Image (tube, rainbow, N blue to C red):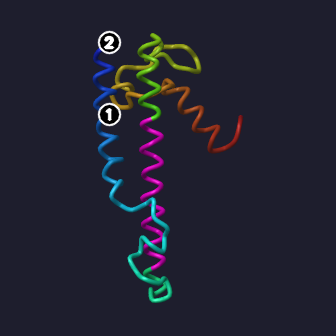
């Protein structure tokens, strides 16, 4: 994949993720949990309703954190294009397969090194 094509692909991904992030801006995640449930008092709420609200709020925060991490990866990939290191595995230095970059444009590792990293994360350093 040439650098212009990669840049366009990454910029489209950045726009998509920014749109997803913006969709959560109106969710009131900057409010306290008591304010977000829409009641004057948390005492009136049934415990199950509060549990549902807490679960939904935590789920939304988790999604936002993941989107922000993906945005950071995209920004880093754009930086690597500028530096001339995009598409090169950070672990072994070999080119990352184009199909992998098409599927995951911000990939930092080749498929083999990604599998090794995931195994080590799951089972500890081996």
Give the percent coordinates (x, y) of residue 99: 35, 24
The image position of residue 33, as x and y in percent, is 49, 70
* Camera-side residue of 109 and 36: 36
Magenta segment: 50-71
Q: Secondary structure at mark 1?
A: helix
Q: Badge 2 is on which residue? A: 2
Query: Where is residue 91, by image quadrant?
Result: top right
Alpha carbons under labels 1 and 2: distance apart: 17 Å
Secondary structure that dominates the magenta span:
helix
**Would you say residue 94 sits in the magenta stretch?**
no
Q: CB atoms at circles 1 and 2 under 8 Å apart?
A: no
Q: Is residue 28 left or right of residue 42?
A: left
Residue 13, numbered circle? 1
Seen from the viewer's position, the closer of residues 53 and 36 is 36
At a point 48% along the width and 16% down the height, the residue shown is 88
Q: Is residue 117 above or below residue 53?
A: above
Residue visible at 51% across and 25% down? Answer: 109
User: Where, quadrant-wise, is the N terminus in this rendering?
Assistant: top left
> Does 55 lie within the magenta span?
yes
Which percent across, then down, holds residue 122? 62, 44
Q: Residues within 10 Å of mark 1 (few under 14, many from 20)?
A: some
């Amino acid at each position: 994949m040439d650098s212009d094509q990669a840049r366009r692909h990454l910029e489209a991904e950045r726009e998509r993720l920014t749109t997803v992030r913006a969709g959560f801006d109106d969710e009131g995640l900057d409010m306290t949990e008591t304010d977000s449930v829409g009641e004057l008092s948390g005492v009136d709420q049934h415990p199950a309703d509060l549990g549902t609200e807490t679960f939904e709020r935590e789920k939304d925060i988790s999604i936002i954190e993941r989107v922000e991490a993906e945005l950071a990866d995209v920004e880093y990939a754009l930086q690597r294009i500028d530096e001339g290191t995009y598409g090169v595995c950070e672990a072994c230095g070999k080119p990352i397969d184009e199909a992998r970059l098409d599927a995951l444009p911000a990939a930092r590792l080749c498929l083999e090194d990604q599998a090794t990293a995931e195994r080590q994360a799951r089972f500890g350093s081996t």
